[in-house]
């Protein structure tokens, strides 16, 4: 009997320890949240541990009732062979029965980590691309990638290994916000004279890793949108982003006449709570885009080189703006795991040539409907 058949037939109560290897990125982790909730319900007696790859991502699952423990594997800190061996030895002490690797994870590092965890059952996706270099055989249960699926749906498809059919409820992005985070956000609004105002959020950044800065629309255009929102709707515009995006945020403020408020000095969950206070969120394809969706805020996302079929804000209430050039998307399911993708043009026209009037038109529709 294959590992897949054994896992489907196993008594859930016999699975005592589960390890989840989370792929990098805030959005990636959030798009697994509904799947994780279903895993928790199915294996109700198991201890569930999740590995995140940056210390700043711990907050995403720290207060999630589906998770018992969050482990940070920061590759910038676990560098030497001795550190890596110690991490693996500590991991194996937990004697995992099941290891689940989230989507997307078409890289050797994920498969090696799953195998070294010592888990009897190792569940991941079966990728068509670059397979000889990623050691996919180290995962003994592989669910085929469906090219028509959104990344969130790819994760839900893992549930078929347990004989589980997901429901619509499982398609929500889950980001629990404790009362103190909501309270901190509202105190921030009060301290900055933002109470009782129409709040609209903007995120002009994105991850800069592996060329993903090419997903960014121009700060000058975001500044124009901020001024238009202030004049047209008397909105208070909040500019969001992490510490590494401070220059982008300050640049938007400098270029705008209305001088929108630059949000800073917040942890991720307080940021999420502040986004939840917004009427609308306008953003590049980014982690905060998915945070906005999890906060149930109507989201308008600008897409250029990335594939909205995979990573668009999930749900009917959200909108995307894109040019749909013939060469776009160049980051697609077909080159998943390859890493850096170079633009064939002198500039990434697919995002830079989006005009502000296109974005204003979509905003106007959303404001009427919202």
Image: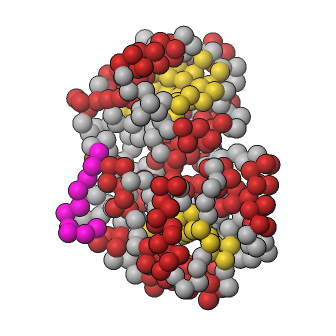
Task: Give the position of the N terminus as an image quadrant.
Answer: top left
The magenta-colored residue range is: 339-348
Q: Is residue 152 above or below residue 73?
A: below
Q: Is residue 209 above or below residue 325?
A: above
Give the left or right position of residue 271, taking residue 224 as reference.
right
Quadrant position of residue 338: top left
Give the left or right position of residue 2, taking residue 46 as reference.
left
Give the left or right position of residue 85, taking residue 68 as reference.
left
Quadrant position of residue 305: bottom left
**Image position, residue 345 (x, y; %):** 20, 67
Which one is in front, 247 or 233? 247
Which one is in front, 256 or 31? 256
Residue at 54%, 86% in the rendered image? 257
Residue at 47%, 12% in the rendered image? 89
**Image position, residue 174 (x, y; %):** 65, 46
Residue at 35%, 18% in the rendered image? 81
Q: Magenta-highlighted stretch: main secondary structure?
A: loop
Total marks drawn? Answer: 0
Task: Give the position of the C terminus as an image quadrant.
Answer: bottom right
**Image position, residue 359 (x, y; %):** 48, 79
């Amino acid at each position: 009997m294959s590992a897949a058949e054994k896992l489907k037939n196993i008594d859930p109560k016999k699975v005592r320890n589960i390890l989840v290897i989370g792929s990098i990125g805030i959005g990636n982790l959030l798009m697994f949240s509904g799947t994780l909730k279903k895993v928790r319900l199915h294996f109700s007696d198991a201890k569930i541990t999740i590995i995140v790859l940056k210390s700043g991502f711990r907050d995403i699952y720290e207060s999630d009732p589906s998770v018992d423990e969050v482990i940070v594997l920061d590759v910038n800190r676990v560098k030497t062979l001795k550190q890596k061996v110690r991490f693996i030895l500590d991991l194996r002490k937990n004697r995992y029965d099941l290891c689940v690797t989230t989507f997307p994870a078409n890289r050797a590092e994920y498969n090696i980590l799953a195998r070294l965890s010592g888990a009897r059952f190792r569940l991941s996706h079966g990728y068509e691309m670059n397979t000889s270099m990623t050691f996919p055989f180290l995962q003994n249960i592989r669910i085929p990638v469906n090219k028509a699926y959104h990344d969130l749906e790819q994760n839900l498809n893992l549930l078929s290994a347990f004989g589980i059919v997901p429901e619509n409820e499982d398609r929500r992005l889950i980001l629990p916000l404790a009362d103190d985070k909501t309270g901190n956000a509202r105190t921030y609004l009060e301290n900055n004279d933002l109470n009782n105002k129409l709040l609209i959020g903007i995120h002009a950044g994105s991850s800069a890793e592996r060329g993903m800065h090419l997903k960014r629309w121009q700060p000058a255009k975001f500044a124009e949108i901020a001024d238009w929102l202030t004049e047209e709707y008397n909105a208070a515009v909040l500019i969001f982003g992490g510490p590494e995006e401070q220059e982008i945020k300050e640049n938007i403020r400098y270029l705008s006449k209305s001088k929108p408020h630059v949000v800073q000095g917040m942890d991720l969950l307080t940021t999420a709570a502040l986004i939840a206070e917004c009427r609308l969120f306008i953003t590049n394809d980014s982690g905060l885009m998915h945070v906005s969706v999890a906060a149930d805020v109507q989201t308008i996302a600008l897409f250029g080189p990335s594939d909205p079929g995979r990573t668009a804000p999930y749900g009917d209430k959200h909108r995307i703006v894109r040019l749909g050039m013939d060469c776009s998307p160049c980051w697609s399911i077909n080159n998943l795991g390859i890493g850096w993708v170079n633009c064939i043009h002198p500039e990434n026209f697919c995002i830079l040539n989006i005009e502000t009037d296109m974005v204003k038109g979509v905003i106007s529709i959303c404001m009427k409907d919202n």
